[in-house]
Each structure stands twice: as C-alpha cells, then as structure tokens.
Image (cartoon, rainbow, N blue to C red):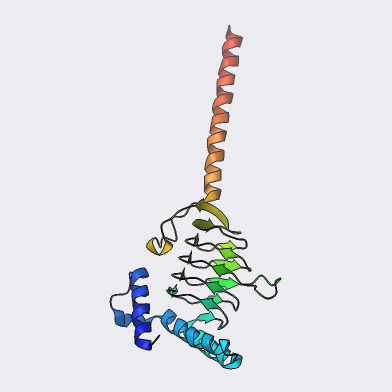
Amino acid sequence: MGIISYIRKEASVIKERDPAIKSSAEVLLYSSFWAILAYRTAHRWYEKKHYFWARWLSQRAARRTGIEIHPGARIGQGLFIDHGHGVVIGETTVIGDNVTLYQGVTLGGNGKEKGKRHPTLGNNVMVSAGAKVLGSFTIGDNSKIGAGSVVLTEVPPNSTVVGVPGRVVKRDNVRLPQQDLDQVSLPDPVKQELEQLKKECAGLRAGLEELRKARLSGEEQ
C-alpha cells in the first residue's frame, strides 16, 4: 500500500471513530498514525529477520509517540489507537480488523508463558482506557473491555468485560464497538449485587416487622 492510500485509509478510520477530527489533514497530527506507519515498516523488516533494525524503528517510534508496538506483533487492518500514550503491544500479540485501543492499554504477557505469550484480539474489539489484557488467550469478536479492567482469561465473542479481575457482565451485544464507543455506561456487577442485597434486606425487615406486629396483636388479645 502506498503512502497516499495509507493516509486516506487512516483518515477514514480516524474520522469514523474520533468526533474531534475535522479534516483529513489532521490525521498527520495523530500519534497513532505515525506509530502504526512505523509498525507496518518494522514488521516487514522483522519478517525478513532484520530484527535489530525492526526493533530500532519501533523503539524510535515509541519515544516519539508514546505508543510501543513490538514489530513481531500481527495487526490487521483498521486499527485505531485514540490518544495512545502508554499503549504497549507485545511481540506475540495478534490483532484482528477494526480494533480500537485507548490510552494506557497494555496487551502483554503474564510472565509465566513461553512462545505465544500475548493475547489475540478478534475483529471489532474495543479496549477502553487503562485496561490490561495479559496472557495468551483470545478476546472474541465484537467484544468490549471496560476502562481500567484487568483481563486474565478468555472472553467469548460479543461480550462486555469490566472489573479487576475482568468478568463478563454482558453477552451477545451484537452492536459493533466502533459504533458504540461509550467507555462509561457499562454494567457494574458489584453495584447490581449490592442493590439485590438491599432489596433482600428490605424484604427481611418488612417480614420481621409483620411478625412483630402479629405477636403484639396476639398478646393484646
């Protein structure tokens, strides 16, 4: 792909997923544009076993953009990294098409695995700000990882994950994440459980009150 075609394609992706962009020329101001461009070149060098120069280019891009993408990672089309500072993508990471990552995201290893040690993200996945995905498992297609979550196990397709450690709180939400970039209005399982406990406690108190009244009524008779 030529540089002009690349710029047009990236401009289209950024316009689709970032409401802040007003013109195609602004794509040149995005750190993700330069980080991904450097990755594409470094990855070609890496595949040709020019490991030193591939790492040199990726580290140079990391210093300039704040986005560290190992040249060994395999990344599909349409990746968008919004803001981007603090993003780390490990060597054996595999990323599908139309994935969105926000600042502070880590796609890393857990320190216990050899060989394939980083995650695989399916198509149309969104990983929100500050989330960490650690280990050699798969995040299924069309899934969303909530901000600040730490994901350590497999995630089925069409799922929403929140929490530390991350838990699936919603399944079969077929609306694609790039059409719904809301990182805030996600289910809160802890809050839901507390609300359920409150309801149960209120019911128990009401039952006890009825028993107390019945007992008092019996004593008066």
Residue 41, placed above or below residue 32: below
Marks counted in the figure total 0
Residue 76 point in image, percent of width and height:
48, 75
Horizontal side, residue 140 vs residue 177: left or right: right
Residue 171 point in image, percent of width and height:
50, 52
Residue 109, placed above or below residue 212: below
Between 37 and 87, the residue placed more toward the observer is: 37
Residue name at image x 48 percent, y 66 percent: 123
Residue 100 showing in the rendered view: yes
Residue name at image x 54 percent, y 40 percent: 196
Between 74 and 210, the residue placed more toward the observer is: 74
Residue 50 point in image, percent of width and height:
58, 92
Which residue is outermost to the left? 23
Residue 28 showing in the rendered view: no
Horizontal side, residue 80 vs residue 73: left or right: left
Image quadrant in which the N terminus is located: bottom left
Residue 221 sits in which quadrant?
A: top right
Residue 183 point in image, percent of width and height:
44, 61
Residue name at image x 48 percent, y 72 percent: 103
Horizontal side, residue 69 vs residue 25: left or right: right
Residue name at image x 43 percent, y 81 percent: 31
